[in-house]
Structures are given as structure tokens and as C-alpha cells.
């Protein structure tokens, strides 16, 4: 079976993006607690996919998400959900979105910088 073509998008680009989306929706968003509803799951997917695609675009990251990245992103989702509390779909959703966005922005800017050793040490 041949891979679908998407106009002028190179096949390696469409494969990379598809792999990123599959990893995030299958392995990262699954870190949400069982009581997280569709709005929270959609917000997590949107925020994480957006930042990871920025990493690809701005930092030329063509290797996709590595196992350490997946573990870090899962931890971000878990922390944001914990801080948002049990009402993730309503009052907790702004907290969840804000915390996850902040953590993802930090991941993009600092955890993946050339020559950077990785996540910050304990405070």
C-alpha cells in the first residue's frame, strides 16, 4: 500500500508529522487522569502538538519525539492536571491550559537548546 501524497509536502515531512501526532495522542495525552473529559484531552493535544511542531520548524528537529521527550511531556500533562484539580472540564481547564502551555514553552526554549544538557536540576 502506498503512502498518501499531500501535494507538495515531502513524504518525509508528512511521515514525521503523522508520527508526532500519533505519539502525542497515543502516549502523551493518555497520561491524563480518567476523569479528564474531551475538552481537556483536546486542549492537551492542541497545546502539545503545536509546541512540538514549533520545535520541528524553529529548531529543525527532524528526529521526532524521543523516549525522554515522551516521558517529559507525560510528566507535564500529569502536573498540569494535578494543579487544575478534579474539575478539569470547567473551572480547572484554564489552570490546566496555562500550566501545560508554560511547561511546553519552557521545554521548547530551554530543554532542547543546542548544547543544553536537558531539563533543569532540582530547585
Image (tube, rainbow, N blue to C red):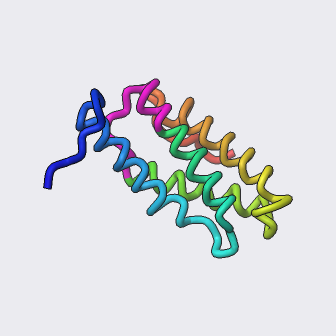
Image quarter of the C terminus: top right
How far across and how far down the image is residue 65, in percent?
39, 47
Point out the residue furthest to the front here: 7
77 horizontally vs 72: left or right:
right
Q: Residue at 25% x, 31% y: name it.
A: 10
113 up-or-down from 25: above or below: above
Query: Residue drawn 73% across and 53% down?
Result: 96
Q: Is residue 61 magenta?
A: yes
Please tell me which residue lies in front, 42 or 61: 42
How many dots with numbers?
Answer: 0
68 shown above or below 78: above
Q: Answer with left or right where residue 40 lies relative to residue 19.
A: right
Residue at 60% x, 44% y: name it. Answer: 47
Task: Locate residue 81: give its quadrant.
Answer: bottom right
The answer to which of 32 and 83 lies nearer the viewer is 32
Residue furthest to the right: 91
Q: Name the residue nearer the viewer: 56 or 115.
A: 56
x 74%, y 45%: residue: 98
- Residue projecting furthest to the bottom: 34
Image x and y of residue 107, in percent:
56, 39
Decide whether residue 50 is among the magenta residues.
no
Q: For this view, does 13 lie left or right of residue 100?
A: left
Which quadrant is the N terminus positioned in? bottom left
> Whole-percent x and y of residue 22?
40, 55
Q: Residue furthest left?
A: 1
Q: Position of residue 49 (x, y in %)?
A: 51, 44
Start-end of magenta stretch: 53-66
Picture layout, residue 83 above or below residue 87:
above
Amino acid at each position: 500500500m502506498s503512502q498518501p501524497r499531500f501535494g507538495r509536502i515531502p513524504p518525509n515531512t508528512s511521515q514525521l508529522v503523522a508520527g508526532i501526532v500519533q505519539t502525542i495522542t497515543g502516549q502523551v495525552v493518555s497520561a491524563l487522569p480518567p476523569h479528564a473529559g474531551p475538552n481537556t484531552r483536546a486542549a492537551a493535544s492542541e497545546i502539545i502538538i503545536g509546541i512540538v511542531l514549533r520545535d520541528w520548524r524553529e529548531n529543525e528537529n527532524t528526529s521526532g519525539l524521543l523516549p525522554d521527550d515522551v516521558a517529559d511531556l507525560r510528566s507535564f500533562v500529569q502536573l498540569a492536571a494535578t494543579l487544575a484539580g478534579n474539575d478539569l472540564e470547567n473551572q480547572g481547564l484554564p489552570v490546566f491550559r496555562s500550566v501545560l502551555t508554560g511547561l511546553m514553552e519552557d521545554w521548547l526554549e530551554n530543554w532542547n537548546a543546542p548544547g543544553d544538557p536537558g531539563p533543569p536540576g532540582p530547585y
